[in-house]
Image (cartoon, grey):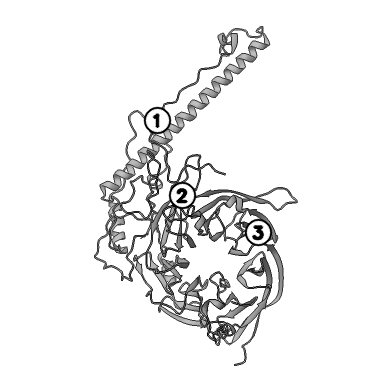
Amino acid sequence: MQHQMPPGALLPTAPLIPQVHQAAAPNFGSSSMLSSDSEDDMTSIPLGELNALLKKENYKLMSLTEKVNRTSRRISKLARIIETRAVSDAFVDRGLQQQVHPQIQSIQSMQSMQSMQSMQPMQPMQPMQSMPPVQSMPPVQSMPPVQSMPAMQPIQPQHPAGMPAAPMPQLQMATQKTVFQVAQSQWVAAPPATESPSSSSTVFIDSPDASAAAAAGQASLWQPRCRDTIDTLFGLNPRVLGQFSRKPRTLLLPQDVKSTLSDIAVVSTLGGQVQWFNLRTKRSVYTIGEDIMANGWAEDMCWISPDVLAVAAVETRQRRVPDGRTSNQLALIYNCSIKPVSSFHHGTLDFQLHHLREAPHERGITCFAPMPHANGKTCWITGGYDKRIFLWAFNDPFSVTSRDYTPIAVQPVHTLHTSVVHTMLYSSQLEVLFSGGADNRLIGWSLERQSSVVSPARQVAQIRDIIAVPTNPNLLLVSFLGRDAQLKLFDHRTQQFVLTISSSDEASTSGGSGEVTEKSSQSRYSHASIHPSGNLVSLGHGTTSKINIWDLRYTRVGAPTQTLSIHDNRVLYARFFEGFGASSIVSLSTDNTMKITDYRIQTNPGLAP
C-alpha cells in the first residue's frame, strides 16, 4: 500500500534550493595518501592498500554522481518555477485573473478571447542571471499555470496546522474551448452573442471538429422502424466465465484501445472485490480483494484513461466522516497492465491503487461519465446521491509519491437535478452532457452554451440508463424504471421521444393490491445494451431470468421481438460485444455468474399482427 499523508496535506514551505549537508568521507586507511591519478608506479603497493584505494575512488564517484543528480534536480525545479511564473505573468497581463462570474459565457466570447490571445503571444521570462539558460525546456503551453485557489470552490479539505492547501491547477487545452462553470438550478437559454466573457475558475476541454458537429446534424442517418423483417439471434453457445460469492454490481467491457488491456472485462461485486477477466481466452485473470480495496464495494466504475480505472465506493454510514461526507469517495487503480508470467500462463494484472482525498459529494458517487482524452488531460464526470454533478481533471500521468499525488481539480457542472443522479452520458459530437435520475428528469447540459438544451420536464418514471445509438449521434436510448415504458428513443434534433418499447408481460404484472408497482418489476441496477449496429437492444426481464431483445428497425416494434434464457435468475447486464472473430453477449446475473454467449444473426419475416 502506498504511504499517504493526512487528507489535503502538502509539502511544508521550504527554501527554493534546500541546503544539503554532506556526510564526512569515510577513512580508507593509509590509502588516503594515494591517488589513482598519480604517476607513481603502484605495482609494488600491497593488495590491501590497492583495495582501499579502489573503495575510495568508488566513493568519490558516488559522491560526484549524487552531486550531479542534485544539481539536475535544482535546475529542473528552477526551470519549472521560471516557466510557471512566465505563464502566470502573461495571464495577469491579459486580465485573466481567476474570478467567479455568475453569468454564462457564450462561445462567441471564447472565440474573441482566443483572437486576443493570438495578438498577444506569451513571452517566456529570461532565466535568472545566476542560472545558465535551460535548452531542453518544454514549450510554455505544455506547463500548467500555477495560480491560487479560485474564489469559489465546492470543497476545501481541512489541513493540519502549518500545512498549506494544495493548489487546484487550472486545466486548459488548445483549439476551440468549452467552458464549465457553476450554473443556477434553472433551465436557461443561451446568452446573447454580444455578451462579453468574464474571467472565472474554469476547466477547458476540447471541442469536436466542425465536421463532426455537422455530421451530428445530418438527418440521413440510421432511423428506427424502417423495415418489416426482424433480426434474431441463433446458434447460442453460452459459457460460464466467472462465479462470485456475492452478487455482481458493475460490468465494464474491454476498451477499444491497443494495449494489454484490450481483451479485459472488469466486474465488481457486493463482496468488495474487483475481478478481471480475459474475454479472448475466456479465463479469469486477477481478483483485487476487499482487503486491498478497503472501501466497501464499487457502486460504479469507469475507465477514465487507457490504464486508469476509477472506482466509486458505496456510501455506508460506518465510513462517514464527521462533516457527513463519505471518506474516500473515489479510488484510482492506475498503471494497469497484463504482465506475462510464462508461455503456459496467460498473464496476471499489474497495477497500483490509491484512494483520493477529494470528496466533493456530500454523500457518495452513484455514476460516472468518461470524457475525451486530449492534450495530456484526463477528465471525467461524477453524479451523486446529493443531486450534484462534478467535473474532475488532472494532468497526465497520474502518479503517487511518498508525500502526495498528482493534483486533481474538481469543479461543479450544474445543479439542475432534484434527486439522486442515476446515469450520465457525455456526447462528444453534440458537446452535451446528458443525465437522468430519480427525479424523472432528462437533463441535457451544453458545454458550449453553458446552459440546458433539453427541457427539464418530468418524464414517465425514474431514469436508470442513457445510451448513445452508435449509428446516429442524435439518438439516445433512455431506460426507465417504469412499468409501461421501459425504453424510449430520444431524438435530440426534435427534442421528442420517437419510439417507446417495453415488455408487455411486465406491464401487466400486478402487485397484491391489483395495481402495478414500478419497483416491483424493475431494478435500478439492471442495464440495457445496444448492438454496435444500432439495430438490436437487450435488457434483462424485471422478474424472471429471461433476456428481452428488440429489433428497433422493425416497423411494429413494441414488445420484445425475441427472448433468451441463459441464466437461472434475474439478469443485470446483457451487453453486446463484437471481438475476437465472434459476436457475443456478456451477461451478469443475480445467480452470481458471469457468462459469455456467442451467437449468429439471421433475418426472419415480421411477427404476425
Q: Seen in the image, is 366 located left or right of residue 169?
A: right
Quadrant where the C terminus lies?
bottom right
Q: Which mark is residue 170?
A: none
Residue 403 at x, y = what percent? 48, 40
Say what amino acid the circle numbered 3 marks: Phe
Q: Judge by depth and name the residue closer to the eye, 245 or 369.
A: 245
Q: Is residue 33 above or below residue 267?
A: above
Say what amino acid the circle numbered 1 marks: Ile
Q: Is residue 32 above or below residue 71?
A: above
Q: Is residue 396 visible?
A: yes
Q: Looking at the image, which residue is at 46% across and 70% down?
A: 437
Question: What residue would you read off at disc 3?
Answer: 277
Residue 553 at x, y = what percent? 55, 82
Q: Judge by depth and name the residue closer to the eye, 514 or 136.
A: 514
> Which numbered disc flags the more N-terminal residue, 1 or 3?
1
Give the structural element (helix, strand or loop) at label 1.
loop
Q: Looking at the image, which residue is at 67% across and 55% down?
A: 285
Front of the two marks 1 and 2: 2
Question: What residue would you read off at disc 1?
Answer: 17
Q: Is residue 232 visible?
A: no
Cα separation, mark 1 vs mark 2, equals 29 Å
Residue 217 at x, y = what percent? 42, 74
Front of the two marks 2 and 3: 2
Q: Is residue 310 above or below residue 560?
A: above
Q: Quadrant of residue 146?
A: top left
Q: Seen in the image, is 505 located left or right of residue 282?
A: left
Q: Residues within 10 Å of mark 3 (few under 14, many from 20)?
A: many
Question: What residue would you read off at disc 2?
Answer: 357
> Which numbered disc flags the more N-terminal residue, 2 or 3?
3
